[in-house]
Amino acid sequence: MTTQGPMTQPPATENLLDLAPDAAMARLQAWLTERGEPSYRSVQIFARLWERPVRAFSEITELPMALRDALTRSFHLSRLELATRQTSVDGTEKFLFRMDDGQLIETVAIPDGDRITLCISSQAGCALQCAFCATGAMGFQRNLRPSEIAGQVRELHLMSPPIVPTNIVFMGMGEPMMNWKAVDTTLSLLNDARAMGIGARHITISTVGVLPGIVALSARREQFRLAISIHAPSDELRATLMPVNTKYPLADVIAATAAFDRRVTFEYVMLGGVNDQPSHATQLAQLARECRAFVNLIPLHPGGTMGFIPSPTSTIAAFARALRVRGVETAIRRSRGLDIAAACGQLRTERLGRRLPIAANEDREIHVA
């Protein structure tokens, strides 16, 4: 196990990567005006933050040297240090990034034909303690800033050769809706044509069912996708697997999801002998029909089982058939990265070990919409 290095403080200068596109443009225009520079320079500079990212202001060679030097003195571009990179035989790549305070987060790139889906983290660790999740077992450390969430995408753009995702899923470490302020800004950075320019329908936010976050996402005009980590079709079973069900009961989650007027997916990890019986399929089908939801059945990754056993392949196939005959569109997710530490949180846990979990209501950094 590798121990965490010494804590370092971020630079005192302002980080433009933490600002939404409109706010960053306004800040740059004000700064340029103070210096007597033409306002069109703000467009040139902002383009090099996200659309065609640079490692440092000194690399923006279309700007005069004096202006590049002034930018370096006034602002900084934060970076994520690549601590580990693993590549699976199936092409899946996992990245462990170290942030400026030594915390580690994970990002996974999953190629599929001409698509590359990037699974990104929104928190360092997670406070929700879902029974089958390696991330929850490590405990919550802190929320990520927009520069650290969208920065995962930015860092892959900066690699040689660059990795340019076509799809983004907030299914890495953490609960996105409990870091909504930063996730809200990140969504703009990922989607805005002046920044990453990824279509809203290619960006999915996954939540265990944090109701204020679902409402806040519904209020955005863009067609972002919503995924609900449901994992059990009844309150009784779900409460044993996901403590958050006490605060956000299944009926309330289903009601909020049914009101969401865009594409919804139910994520359902198949736990052998726990949630994979025919009666569970019948209950899940009813919930899915209420929400017009697509169901994604997920074989439990053997690297992060947390004491559970994966459902047999035959059981998963029968479960899928039971959903389909009840009119529910269903897919079985193909397991990827089986030869690397690809279960969410597994690679970070290998490097830092597990920490005592922190309950969601015990940490001031956790906030919802």
Image (cartoon, rainbow, N blue to C red):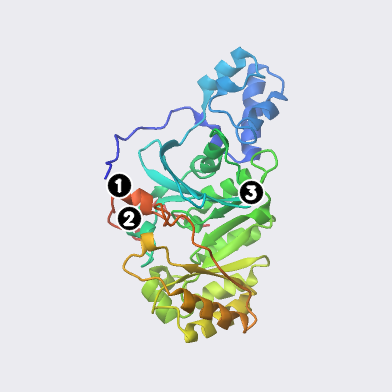
Residue 282, horizontal then vertical, whole percent? 54, 85
Which residue type carries mark 1? Leu
Residue 152's spot in the image, x, y percent? 51, 42
Report the Cα–Cα distance between label 3 and label 2. Answer: 30 Å
- Against 247, is 194 above or below? above
Decide: is 156 above or below 44. Answer: below
Q: For the point 63% across and 17% down, which residue is it?
A: 35
121 or 295: nearer the viewer: 295
| Residue wearing tag 3 | 166
**Furthest residue toward front:** 89
- Would you identify the image quadrant in which residue 258 lies? bottom right
Q: Is residue 351 left or right of residue 247?
A: left
* Among numbered discs 3 and 2, the one appearing first in the sequence: 2
* Label located before the other in sequence (1 or 2): 2
Marks 1 and 2 in Cβ contact (< 8 Å):
yes
Q: Name the residue under label 1.
A: 352
**What amino acid does circle 3 point to?**
Thr
Q: Mark 2 packing: few (<14 Cα in 10 Å), some, or many (20+)?
A: many
In percent of width and height, residue 242 lies at 40, 70
Answer above or below: position of 260 versus 344: below
Q: Residue 34 carries which label?
A: none
Element under disc 1: helix
Observer-side mark, 1 or 3, equals: 3
CA–CA distance between discs 1 and 2? 9 Å
Q: In which quarter of the image is residue 296?
A: bottom right
Check disc 2 and give the amino acid type. Met
Q: Quick one: SS at disc 3?
A: loop
Residue 131 occupies quadrant = bottom left
